[in-house]
Amino acid sequence: MMTKIMNYENELKTKNLKVTPQRVAILKEIENSGHISIEDIYEKIKKTYPSISLATVYKNINTMQDAHILRSVKAPSQKQKFELCDDKHVHVACQECGKLEDVRLDMSEAMKACAEATGYDIYDVSAIFIGTCKECKQKG
Amino acid sequence: MMTKIMNYENELKTKNLKVTPQRVAILKEIENSGHISIEDIYEKIKKTYPSISLATVYKNINTMQDAHILRSVKAPSQKQKFELCDDKHVHVACQECGKLEDVRLDMSEAMKACAEATGYDIYDVSAIFIGTCKECKQKG
DNA sequence: CTCTGTGCAAAGCGTTTGCAAACGA
DNA sequence: TCGTTTGCAAACGCTTTGCACAGAG
């Protein structure tokens, strides 16, 4: 089974971005975690790559967001987190415990409805469903 | 036609929050604009109420968010904006011109599907559809 | 070799906090 | 009156920037 990392090297090259160890490390952390904050990316990478600087993480996150390799997710009253663009999914957040999970849910119907209602060309959607998770329902 | 403001006075009282001119002014600005940033709320209120301080706007936004009178919307690469909780709608953002609009789109099907897929109780959803608006399509 | 990316330290902003005075109930 | 809210100024924390050096192509 081939790792995704090679694909991201190609994606970086396609967008005229240089393939640096820092960028590969950032993409690897995001791939592993699904969605992760800047601070957490930095802390994790520092363990195996102590010389990396937080500014570099910020710069690369911005560069790769502009290149549509990454995108941000922001749940209410939580830090900004980042995920890979090719990872099509929505999110569900538990109001009780603050957990944020990915859900593979097809939103194409809703996107179509939105396009019809507005006259926009819709090509993506960022959705966060808010509720209470199984565990918290039992406790509650 | 009765203004919504009276309802919000009641809502504040119900939540044990005092009805101050600052809070009423903030709610009025949000009601007028649909969604608005903190800075814009402050600038608008200052015109008719010059003594208001930015810190007060922040404190009240936070208090009223905690009381579920307001909630935040955050579109990628834009400032946080705020809207009234009772205003059920989703958003559409134009990638070209940055415009953010409200869309009255029924998301109950998607909420049901998400509840089934995850086992969560889902009671709200924050969705931002990303695309290109009519005007930008013509220009583009 | 050239141009992009990195790391550091400093600057920049948006947001929060502490406190005394003012205000709503 | 009593507890909450306000306004100010200072503090904070996250993010960006400028610059010299290092590294990718």
Image: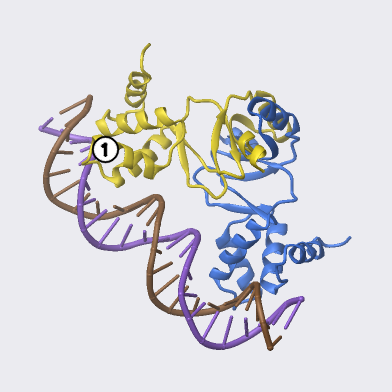
Chain colours: A yellow, B blue, C purple, D brown
Considering depth in this image, is A136 or D4 the residue closer to the camera? A136
Q: Is residue A122 left or right of residue B9?
A: left
Q: Is residue B66 above or below residue B131?
A: below
Q: Position of residue A137 (x, y in %)?
A: 67, 38
Q: Mark yes or no: residue A74 visible.
A: yes
Quadrant of image for the N terminus of chain A? top left
Category of crowding for the residue at label 1, using alpha-carbon neighbours closer than 10 angstroms: few (below 14), some (14–19), many (at least 20): few
Single out the residue that lies furthest toward the top. Answer: A1
Single out the residue that lies furthest toward the right. Answer: B1
Snapshot quadrant of residue A45: top left
Q: Is residue B13 left or right of residue C11?
A: right
Q: Residue at x 36, y 27 (%)?
A: A15
Q: Position of residue A18 (x, y in %)?
A: 27, 30
Instruction: Count the labels in the image.
Output: 1
Q: Position of residue B18 (x, y in %)?
A: 71, 71
As shown in the figure, which amino acid type bears the numbered disc 1?
Lys
What residue does disc 1 label? Answer: A47
Q: Is residue A92 above or below residue B59?
A: above
Q: Is residue A114 above or below residue B19?
A: above
Snapshot quadrant of residue A94: top right
Quadrant of image for the C terminus of chain A? top right
Q: Mark yes or no: residue A17 visible.
A: no
Q: Chain of mark 1?
A: A
Considering depth in this image, is B40 or A78 the residue closer to the camera? A78
